[in-house]
Image: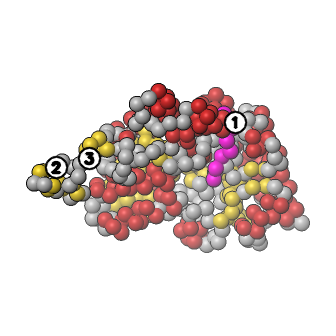
Amino acid sequence: MNALHIKQDFPLLRSSSVVYLDSAATAQKPDAVIDAISNFYRTSNAPVHRGIYALAEQATQLYEDARKAVADFINAESQEIVFTSGTTDSINMVAYAWAADTLKEGDEIVLPESEHHANLLVWQQLAHRNKLVINYVKLTDDFKLDLNDFLQKITHKTKLVTFALSSHIFGNYPQEYIRAIIAKAHEVGAKILCDAAQAVGHMKIDMQLSGIDFLAFSGHKIFGPTGIGVLYVNKKNFSAMGVYRIGGGMVQSAQLGCTQLGCAQLSGEQLSCPEWKEMPYRLEAGTPPIAQAIGLHAALSYFKEKIVYQELAEHEDTLTKHLLERLKKHDDIVIMQPRYEQPVHNHLVSFYSKKFHAHDIAAWLSQYNVAVRAGHHCAQPIHQRLGIVASVRVSFHAYTTMHDIDMLCHALDQLYK
């Protein structure tokens, strides 16, 4: 894969000297995505699903084409794809459209202690509200997901197992681990929610083979715009899905006099409660992110045209190996990448220094126009448990070159002089 050639498709990267190594936070956008959004606003801007005129029908078609493109990308059905504002919104949707009315006092949720706050705090809040139990899966001191602990914590009391397919701090888990976790969850009848924010742009996801009930990811991490996310809901769960946000577009019929607890009287007449639309529309209240969905469609089309997953994995593994070799030159740097029994592909490397604060390292690198992420990465509990104030994360994508890694390492070498 020619990363330098791909980089030319990304205007921010080709027109500046920035060494962008923060793709795990957000990926850069190719011309194709920017043009698709601009063209929509210039030629097709109209509301969807409402207007009975040609322009609105054109916008609706573009929006629904985007839904089909997402479904095709992860081998799902269009009706299983809900557009959201991002991964966080998607996870909250599962919590309040499904779990809030399904999980009862004493039911258990299992999740790793290293999860992003987006897949942690919402479950803590719901656990407090519904008197649920959260069982946290440990990470070992050398940053590995403890598979034995994970499997032991999944019991017949477990109703939801949730985890990131790829950690935003520690990278990918072995596929054998993921398969074992899903199999154990199926064995006890628990539902499975996976955060694919870090995975979808770096590994092939096939919902027909995964056994996953809910999958969440954001468009902006796979070359798409911000403000658009995806929630996949396996159709076998449709009957258990309630509503999340209430408003226009997601209701089939509504009348005065109805309350959440049942029907009320109005002028002596019994009225029916609202009738919600079928999936996925019952979860898409209000005006949806139309332009963003069209931008995501363009991003997925670009990805399918330009990127081969196997070639991307080989490219990112080469970058990872080179970076690790250079980081090992500095005795005070602790590399936070676990070493599993099986080789694991990765698109990011996290580390911390015993000498310099992570924020100081990031600020130093910024003087050399190198962009990395520093902090707790929205995962404070695992940093606290490991006794780490903050860490530095270097993350790649298809446009990252070996020269980018060398520029980072050169700047680090200057810091240590």
Label disc, if present, on residue 31 of the rendered structure: 1
Question: Residue 271 — which label?
Answer: 2
Q: Which stretch appears magenta?
A: 25-33
Give the number of the mark in front: 1 or 3: 3
- The secondary structure making up most of the magenta span is loop
Q: Is mark 2 on a helix, strand or loop?
A: loop
Magenta-span inclusion, residue 30: yes
Indicate whether residue 191 is drawn in magenta: no
Q: Residue 254 carries which label?
A: 3
- Which of the two residues, 217 or 46, is positioned nearer the viewer here? 46
Can you give x and y, in whole percent of width and height, for residue 231 in the image? 45, 45
Q: Earlier in the sequence, mark 1 or mark 2?
A: 1
In the rendered view, would you say 43 is above or below 216? above
Q: Residue at x 53, y 68 (%)?
A: 381
Residue 298, position as x, y percentages in the image: 60, 33
**In the rendered structure, which amino acid carries the disc numbered 1?**
Asp
Q: Residue at image x 23%, y 48%?
A: 255
The amino acid sitting under disc 2 is Leu
Question: Which of 129 and 404 lies nearest the eye of the viewer?
Answer: 129
